[in-house]
Image: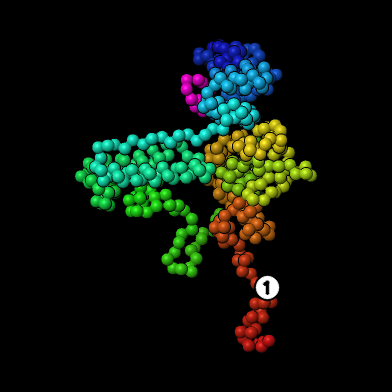
């Protein structure tokens, strides 16, 4: 049996085997005396529980467990001591710590970090090194493509999107490799590149960097390299509507069964996240971006939220689970300023990224679950496109796809009497 002191709280910990445990939550380990798991200090208990959260990288040479130990020790002296301790740490360390603590304390800790270090600014764009030994004609094309990618990066950041600091550098990896390859083949100008050169280069990279490769090829053809290629296909035959494949949906009973299974296996937070997808028609990404600013308590005491453009009352059976979730993320959430509430996304705080959550709970069923919610709303009588768009956030192209599941086109349906009168006039039975 191996024993050691917990690196977090200092309690004596023993474990069966030869390898001594690092902390109280180590596999098959148990503390011999009182540790932070049973502390009367709530923040110390949450610091201990944070060791069970998926670890993330802390910048510098400081380990996460060291930051948690310091935070737990100063928490015994109150909030003012915590804020003073945050002033002694680097802003980058504090913001990274917020991402790897227990969800119940991440909201409060993020507000303390913002009060000390302010809101995190976008990371500086990393520079790109273009080899100077390339022919000038190839260098000119690479510099023009770099300027386009940089302009796109800045435009996306200005519009509120997030992109990694190496966005442009990653976009330039493949064009630089292509330029080097062309020099080896004796090609010194972009307009002299042949299709067989591009095919041979594509084979040399084994299909990697496909998105960057296609974007750069469009650039070489004087096209917009970042043009959005998704959406409804266009047809050269004007007036002919392209064929739309009806989406797959689940029966309401199957949706309810799926939600209950997720609730029993993953808890209320996972259930509420999928309820937004399977009952409210939100995408998983939009559900995880739903912020505290989109929740409110009405004058009548009802909990309402805004998934798209209009406020909707939360069903009474789900009011308490939602209130408990919001309180767990941030006690007194409805009293916070709207600016602070807009930066706290409860689902994302509790469950992490949307992609990982979907892969873990309902792999390959997220779109089907959302389509089922939209179809159920249509079958219940909500057929107005504007209403569906503003209440559920469904785009018009998606609504058109969903309408292919209906037996008739509800937006062209005429009263049978009008059709009968028209036919009578065509046959000459009526002259009025």
Is 420 in the magenta?
A: no
The part of the chain drawn in magenta is 55-65
Residue under the image location 67 percent in, 81 percent down: 421
Residue 142 left/right relative to 364: left
| Chosen colour scheme | rainbow
Residue under the image location 79 percent in, 44 percent down: 300
Residue 294 left/right relative to 211: right
Residue 387 left/right relative to 244: right
Please give the residue where the numbered disc 1 appears in the rendered image.
415
* The quadrant where residue 5 appears: top right
Image spot of residue 20 (x, y percent): 52, 14
Image spot of residue 398 (x, y percent): 56, 56
Residue under the image location 60 percent in, 15 percent down: 9
Residue 318 in view in this figure: no
> Which of 383/90 is in front?
90
> Which of 391/4 is in front?
391
Residue under the image location 58 percent in, 47 percent down: 283
- State whether the magenta stretch is mostly helix, strand or loop: loop
Is 62 in the magenta?
A: yes
Helix, strand or loop for disc 1: loop
């Amino acid at each position: 049996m191996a024993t050691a002191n917990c690196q977090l709280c200092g309690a004596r910990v023993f474990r069966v085997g030869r390898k001594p445990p690092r902390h109280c939550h180590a596999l098959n380990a148990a503390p011999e005396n009182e540790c932070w798991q049973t502390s009367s200090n709530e923040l110390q208990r949450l610091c201990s529980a944070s060791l069970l959260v998926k670890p993330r990288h802390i910048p510098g040479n400081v380990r996460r467990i060291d930051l948690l130990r310091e935070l737990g020790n100063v928490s015994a002296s109150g909030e003012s001591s915590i804020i003073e301790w945050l002033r002694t740490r680097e802003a980058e360390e504090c913001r990274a710590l917020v991402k790897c603590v227990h969800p119940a304390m991440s909201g409060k800790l993020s507000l303390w970090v913002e009060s000390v270090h302010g809101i995190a600014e976008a990371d500086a764009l990393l520079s790109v090194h273009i080899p100077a030994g390339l022919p000038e004609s190839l260098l000119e094309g690479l510099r023009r493509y770099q300027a386009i990618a940089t302009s796109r990066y800045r435009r996306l950041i200005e519009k509120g999107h997030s992109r990694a600091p190496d966005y442009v550098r990653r976009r330039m990896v493949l064009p630089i490799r292509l330029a080097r390859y062309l020099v080896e083949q004796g090609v010194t100008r972009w307009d002299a590149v042949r299709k067989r050169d591009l095919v041979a280069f594509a084979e040399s990279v084994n299909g990697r960097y496909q998105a960057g490769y296609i974007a750069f090829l469009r650039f070489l053809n004087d096209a917009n390299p970042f043009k959005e290629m998704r959406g409804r296909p266009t047809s050269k035959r004007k007036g002919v509507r392209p064929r739309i494949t009806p989406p797959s949906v689940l029966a309401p009973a199957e949706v309810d069964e799926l939600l209950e299974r997720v609730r029993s296996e993953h808890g209320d937070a996972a259930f509420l996240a999928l309820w937004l997808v399977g009952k409210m028609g939100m995408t998983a990404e939009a559900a995880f971006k739903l912020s505290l600013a989109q929740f409110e308590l009405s004058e009548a005491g009802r909990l309402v939220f805004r998934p798209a453009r209009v406020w909707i009352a939360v069903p009474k059976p789900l009011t308490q689970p939602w209130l408990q979730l919001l309180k767990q993320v941030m006690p007194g959430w409805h009293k916070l300023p709207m600016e602070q509430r807009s930066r706290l996304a409860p689902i994302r705080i509790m469950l992490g990224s949307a992609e990982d959550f979907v892969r873990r709970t309902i792999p390959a069923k997220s779109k089907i679950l959302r389509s089922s919610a939209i179809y159920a709303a249509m079958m219940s009588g909500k057929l107005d496109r504007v209403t569906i768009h503003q209440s559920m956030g469904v785009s018009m192209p998606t609504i058109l796809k969903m309408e292919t599941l209906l037996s008739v086109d509800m937006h062209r349906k005429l009263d049978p009497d009008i059709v009968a009168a028209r036919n009578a006039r065509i046959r000459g039975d009526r002259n009025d």
